Amino acid sequence: MKIRTRFMGEVEIDEKQIIDFPEGIPGFEDSRKYALLDIPENDVFKILQNAEDEYVSFVVTDPWAFFKSYDFDIPDEELQKINISKKEQLAVLNIVTLSDDFEKSTLNLLAPVVINKEDRVGRQYVLNSGKYMTKHPLFTEEEN
């Protein structure tokens, strides 16, 4: 199937790539079907692209690529909402807010995007943690 994307124009994806977000993403509750797209020649960032609206997309990354000590707990009942029963099913991404000055870009560590890799279902979970922010500097002295 072909989808229009915000950053890469029209791309061909397999329907099996679609990740269902039954509750949407906070602020985008009506956007429920996404594809996780690779960015050519970039191993660090990906695009979480809404499959039905080219203007709804997020740059995401593996948080541990920048913050090796990132740690959080999600209650089992929250993980059960996306059918997670074992950690091998789980993928975690965080949304990046890009700045015109790339060095000032931020990462939302307070609300990770959790995905069941097997069932292709996800949700964004807001942590009950005072140590993480929605706009944590991506590049700090603490990195890696």
Image: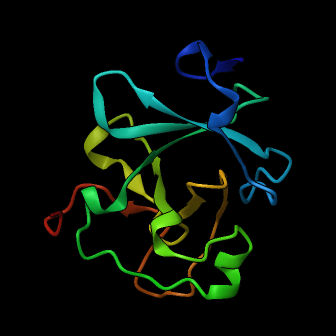
Q: Is residue 102 above or below residue 79?
A: above
Q: Give residue 64's position: percent from left, percent from top.
A: 29, 63
Q: Give residue 123's position: percent from left, percent from top.
A: 67, 62
Which image quadrant for residue 27?
Answer: bottom right
Q: Give residue 15's position: percent from left, percent from top.
A: 70, 29
Residue at image coords 47%, 88%: 130
Q: Is residue 76 above or below residue 31?
A: below
Farthest-out residue, right: 30
Image quarter in which the N terminus is found: top right
Circle count: 0
Image quarter in which the C terminus is found: bottom left
Q: In this view, does 21 lie above or below 5?
A: below
Q: In this view, does 80 lie above or below 90?
A: below
Residue at image coords 35%, 60%: 63
Which image quadrant for residue 10?
Answer: top right
Farthest-out residue, top: 10
Residue at image coords 50%, 87%: 129
Q: Give residue 34's position: percent from left, percent from top.
A: 68, 40
Q: Is residue 117 left or right of residue 24?
A: left
Residue at image coords 65%, 50%: 120
**Colouring mode (rainbow / by chain / secondary structure / one colour):** rainbow
